[in-house]
Amino acid sequence: MNKKQSALHEKEGVIKPETTNFSSAEKIKINRAKKNAVDEFVTQILKGNITFLSKAITLVESTNANHQKKANEILEKCLPFSNNAIRIGITGVPGVGKSTFIEAFGKHLTKKGHKVAVLAVDPSSSINKGSILGDKTRMEQLVTDKNAFIRPSPSGTSLGGVAQKTRESIILCEAAGFDTIIIETVGVGQSETVVHSMVDFFLLLKLAGAGDELQGIKRGIIEMADAIVINKADGDNAKNAKIAKVEFNRALHLYPLKESKWQPKVITASALENLNIDKVDEMIGEYLELTKNNNYFTEKRNEQNTYWLLSTINQQLKDNFYNNPYIIKELTKEIVNLKNGKTTPFNAAKRLLNL
């Protein structure tokens, strides 16, 4: 018996068009894979292209040898266009309001027509997740400002390494047309000393109303500071801020006059209420006028360049030593001998250095 055929027939449909043109996809892949030439990087950075600036800083931060080579070529070509910005270092313990202050200060500068770049030296960021990574989300207004650039710090435990990368990032930011570079650090460890060695003006942020205002302040930081800003001087804390200002002024007058002939000043401010932010700007302007007139500004920059030359040599020698395969092998042996009491740290070090 013949099976009755159904009147329903399934016709072959139209072949579904490809959503992506293969030739276009290949071009995109090639373009992505294609590494931007050094000259293109330099041209775009000099035009103020933030994307290329960010990529160049990523190359600087990379530990890849090829990336380092390319970064050095970019730096060499950008160098003649740098050295024309004001570098301001800002430090203070966590909770002092650095993010809020930098945002208020940065917005004040961009409104005046300045271009501001915010960088960080924070070797502790790998432990406590750092301040600047959070700062980028907290500086909501500054991060959207077309005349501002905020760069999170590369996390790492080597202060020298992080600082060197930050210093190289300064060169790139200056070449990109930023005329004010703000370098932030958490007021812990030796990071303030490193920041001081790469800035023109060093600003210490403090809080009032926490008991003895001078207690816990390292002598070295006070000596380095060109100014102290007592932040959060608003509301109920305004009175405490005034008392703190008097105490800090007394303390600063105990120190001999700086080589720059500048007498450090104390200002109360409130970043939250935008109070006295303009006075901080005026004070930095006074400092720059004084130091440029007496030639200290140029002398300090030359000293800093010498310091970083020697520092880079030390860092490179250290890296070459510890990355040498033969040294790695012999160092392991010496550590075993040390644990077994067969040698002393000094003799072991001498043998390794003489290899």
Image (tube, rainbow, N blue to C red):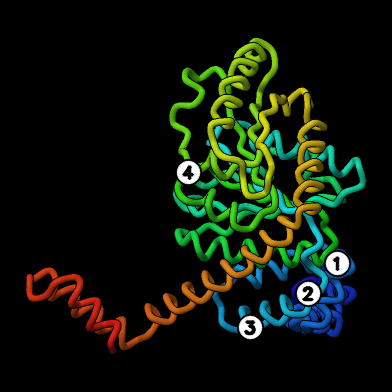
* Residue that appears at 70% across and 27% down: 267
Residue 306 at least partly seen: yes
On screen, residue 60 above or below 193: below
* Residue marked by disc 4: 188
Looking at the rendered structure, the secondary structure element under dot 4 is loop
Q: Which mark is residue 8?
A: 1
On screen, residue 49 above or below 348: above
From the top left corner, tell me how far across and down residue 61 is, in percent: 60, 68
Closer to the camera in the image, 219 or 69: 219
* Residue that appears at 64% across and 37% down: 98
Question: Badge 3, how many Cα within 10 Å: few under 14, some, many 20+?
Answer: few
Q: CA distance from mark 2 to mark 1?
A: 74 Å
Question: Badge 4, how many Cα within 10 Å: few under 14, some, many 20+?
Answer: some
State if disc 4 and disc 2 touch (CB < 8 Å): no
Sequence-wise, the earlier of marks 3 and 2 is: 3
Q: CA distance from mark 1 to mark 3?
A: 70 Å
From the top left corner, tell me how far across and down residue 137 is, in percent: 68, 42
Q: CA distance from mark 1 to mark 4?
A: 81 Å
Q: Amino acid at mark 1?
A: Leu
* Residue marked by disc 3: 69
* Residue marked by disc 2: 78
State if disc 4 and disc 1 touch (CB < 8 Å): no
Closer to the camera in the image, 340 or 9: 340
